[in-house]
Image (spheres, rainbow, N blue to C red):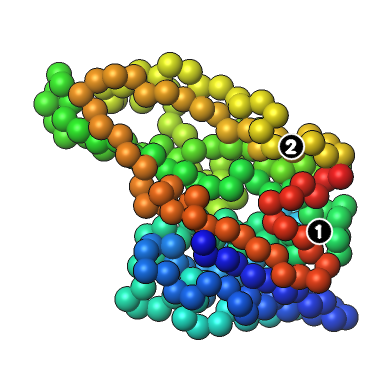
Amino acid sequence: SLPVKLKVTISSDQMHFDFTGSAPTALGPMNMSRNTTVSSCFVAIKHLFPDVPVNGGTFRPITIEAPPRTVLSAEYPAPCGGYLEPMGRVIDVVFGSLSKAMPERAPASFFGTIGVVAISGTHPKRRNYFVGVFPYPGGYGATRASDGLVNGTPPQSMANFMSLEMSEHRFPLRFDYYRLREDSGGAGWHRQVRSRRAQTWGRGRTKHCRGPSCRAAGRTRARDSSQSGRAASACRGR
């Protein structure tokens, strides 16, 4: 596992994020640069304060400490091909750390992984080589105000799942279904719609595989060490 630990200190009009204790630099691609860690924190804050405009002073009160030689502060030659996975964990632990300081704003965790599936092969009719990339959508965690978003893009990316009709036209595959997985997110004050739409690949002269991000996602674990926070995977809408 690759724990991501965060302590948030709020003093007057200043907020400090300290990621001390997070996992050391990984041998695999589950690392990201310090700049990406900083950006992830800003993404989470923007989710919590959607009405605040982004300008030169928006994030000035926030300071961030990401110790060197960790998965959150990678330097050359550390591999970073799967950086979207730890990026999602950082966003999630920021939500978790601030869930008691501002419970009316902090959502429960989102669906957890960007889960890219890649397919490739030789088209049986056109005889050309093809590559298809399918980033999984999923549900967002509930807040005290409302249910979670159904079938959203990963918060750390704007990548959408390609339409089924276009996919079947372009690639030699067929989808058996594409539907919500009901009640996969758990109960709370409001419904935590963490359901993910599922699909089955049709048979054909195609091979499909999960990328390094997906293979490593199951081994990545987010931890919240804030005194006021709780586990990032818990439902905080209760």
- Circle 2: is it few (<14), some (14-19), or many (20+) Cα within 10 Å? some
Q: Nearer the viewer, mark 2 or mark 1?
A: 2
Q: Position of residue 38 (x, y in %)?
A: 59, 71
Query: In this figure, what is the number of numbered marks?
Result: 2
Residue 156: assigned label: none
Q: Amino acid at mark 2?
A: Gly
Q: Quarter of the image containing the C terminus? A: top right
Viewer-proximal residue among 59 and 29: 29
- 166 vs 8, left or right, is left
Q: Position of residue 13 (x, y in %)?
A: 84, 78
Which element is circle 1 on?
loop
| Quadrant in which residue 80 is drawn | bottom left
Residue 186: assigned label: 2
| Quadrant in which residue 78 is drawn | bottom left
Q: Is residue 25 above or below residue 118?
A: below
Determine if residue 163 is in view. Answer: yes
Q: Residue at x 80, y 50 (%)?
A: 236
Q: Position of residue 129 (x, y in %)?
A: 16, 34
Q: Residue at x 85, y 81 (%)?
A: 11
- 162 vs 126, left or right, is right
Which residue is denoted by mark 1 in the rendering?
A: 99
Which element is circle 2 on?
loop
Q: Residue at x 11, y 26 (%)?
A: 127
Q: Residue at x 55, y 29 (%)?
A: 197
Viewer-proximal residue among 218 and 13: 218
Q: Amino acid at mark 1?
A: Ser
